[in-house]
Amino acid sequence: MLRSKVGYSMNEDSFTSGVMTAKNAIIGSSSKIGFLYTSCVSNVKEVVKGVRSVTDIPLIGCTSSGAIMVPEGIVASEKGFAGMMSMSDVNLTVGVACHEAGKNARLIGRKVAMEAAKKAGMNIAPSYFYMVASPKEEEDYLMGIQDVIGRVPFFGGSAADDTVEGKWKIICDEKVFSDGVAVAFFYTANDIVTEYTGAYRETKNMGIVTEVNDDRNLVSIDGVKALKKYGEWIGKSVNDLRGTNLLVESICKPLGVKDQVGNLTVIRHPMVGNTNDTMNLGNKLVPGTTVIQMEATVDELIDSTGDTLKLVRKELTTEPGAYFLVHCGGRKLGIGNRLEEVHKQLVKEAKGVPFICIFTFGEYGYREHSANTCGGLMLSFTGFGKE
């Protein structure tokens, strides 16, 4: 039977924070994995050293944007924080592996997949897997992993900092690095389900992507410069959308791309409005794709968290033992000082089951009959059944 426990600390000393977090999260000697998350202002290596002074279980995680949430409340401090969820189950086997960024992200994905299976002592594909990567080549890492194990359900999100300055870190056992990928392979017969959604509404504004540079620079829609077309859709001038103004303006009005069967609309977050009227996106986009302007109010962003966790609970076929909740850092920015309302929703729907919620710069998941994919401004909420 799966058990989980969450520990956290806001101690200013990073090593001590790691020690306190681990002591509060470890389930005796039976813990199989620790999901570890910290602030980007913490000394992440010292946090890991602190955790390692308490336990040698496999570790995986990253920096979370501004905060994490646990049942007791919002864990946030300008001087740093740490939080960890551990899981224990005699029928669970876990293997973690990582690799720093290099010239060929897809090849790196293959390497970490093979290493994770090897560390788990397995020569078969896992039941489920978790991925964390830097916000750049997530799709290529995923392709490499799937080259090895096929289409196995997955969940996770990209490492984040507080100000989109590249101060994020990835954690994998004793290793701490800025750019690359880490995975955790789960071998279990227990029920695991993920609800992956943006929870936005479609508008009537849509168009065909006609030019893209370097995968994430959207040049034009319907032959019109992307920033101009998007501005027309949302009623803003291109000057209002320059630089990171676009990032903020688009939180409640992002772009969406449907999958091939229409079950999933993956969100693309417009991040930077360039002087040549192109826009930088948080994920890949290809020419010939239809993009839809989506929309949601802040109230809807808040309510979507409780609604999504409720769906996870309903989809589990057994009693839940843990909830692992990935929430976009951009959505958090849009929610602003109303984050406490999100926490109340999660506590209500978790119904006493341990959970940890992290804030990322990219979210990963799937829907029924859809491919594994990566998006932005999304929720990737995963429930682990006790059996």
Image: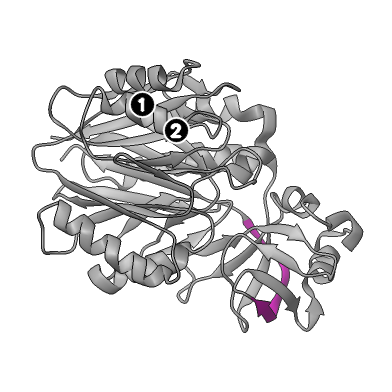
Please identify the quarter of the rendering in which residue 87 is found: top left
Residue 351 shows which numbered tag? Answer: 1
Vertical placement of residue 10 versus 313, above or below: above
33 or 371: nearer the viewer: 33
For the point 72% across and 52% down, the residue is 247
Residue at image coords 14%, 43%: 92
Q: In the rendered view of the protein, which quadrant contains the C terminus?
A: top left
Left or right position of 85 against 279: left
| Type of secondary structure dominating the magenta stretch | strand
- Is any atom of residue 350 visible in this view? no
Comes first in the chain, label 1 or label 2: 2
Residue 211: where, in percent of width, then height? Answer: 69, 81
Mark 2 — residue?
Answer: 44
Q: Is residue 63 visible?
A: yes
Quarter of the image where the N terminus is located: top left
Residue range of the region highlighted in magenta in the rendering: 201-213
Label 2 amino acid?
Val
